[in-house]
Amino acid sequence: MSSVANLGAQDLTWIYKEQAKAIDFNMLFRDIIPAGIYSGGIVAQVNATTVQIPVWSGIINTNDTLGAVKCTTGLSYNFVTFSGSLADGEYVIYGLLTWAETPNNFIGYYIRDILAASVTNELIFGTMTVVSNAITTVTPNRRMIGRFNDVQTKLDHLMSTQGWAYSESVGSGTSAYPQYIILSSGVHRIRQNITWASTSAQTKNPSVIVYQYSSDSGTIYVTIATKTYTYATDQLTAIAWS
């Protein structure tokens, strides 16, 4: 039985009778949810040449500009051993997915110098420090980075289209993780005063954001509200306003 009802002009997600599977479906999935590690995957040191990455779940963009995949790894731990002599320095540990039309795909794990350019579609698990050709420390990546940055980007875009200008001020933070994010319109200012978490599994996630308003170009700010984030290891468990 088929319908012949005229439903008007429609924007269809996929065309009639197209098989919405494999890469066809994953092309639709791209950028719907920001790429990132959403649970698990807390990288840790095993020995001087090996790190372990436990089961994780997240969104990873594929090796092209079209696909994105919700990924949950199947092994309890992935042990990544770096062969050869490791030069002293600090490295980024990241994963890449090369898409293949098969029942199972595999994540490749790699390292790059922390100052090197990012790799297209890389999913960062953490950083490691090498001293005397041996891994000495491993720091997990912050959780849910994609989700936080995506919300912030949308807020910035919305405010800029309404005549508000975006700026950052380092304050007690860094250029990458500033203390202040400021939106300006004439003499009006809306400022986010951010405290970044310091616990290793939560590093560079916000722990507290104080929203402030100024009507005199930023000379005096008054607090509008405070947002407090609560974490359990690497998971965001609660958000409270006060």
Image (cartoon, rainbow, N blue to C red):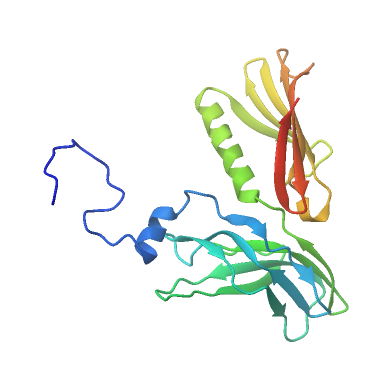
Task: List x then y, in percent, for residue 119.
Answer: 59, 64
The quadrant holding residue 43 is bottom right
Task: List x then y, in percent, for residue 25.
Answer: 37, 59
| Farthest bottom residue in view | 84
* Viewport quadrant of the C terminus: top right
Please determine whether, in this image, residue 54 is positioned above or below residue 28.
below
| Farthest top residue in view | 215
Is residue 117 something one can see in this rendering? no
Task: List x then y, in percent, for residue 220.
Answer: 79, 16
Residue drawn at 61 percent across, 68 percent down: 95
How many labels, in total?
0
Please determine whether, in this image, residue 51 is positioned above or below residue 22.
below
| Farthest front residue in view | 1
Residue drawn at 72 percent across, 81 percent down: 81
Is residue 157 something one can see in this rendering? yes
Which residue is at the front of the view, 74 or 61? 74
Please determine whether, in this image, residue 169 is positioned above or below residue 139.
above
Relative horizontal placement of residue 218, taking residue 159 as reference (left or right): right
Residue drawn at 44 percent across, 61 percent down: 67
Residue drawn at 84 percent across, 48 percent down: 198
Task: List x then y, in percent, for residue 21.
Answer: 35, 63
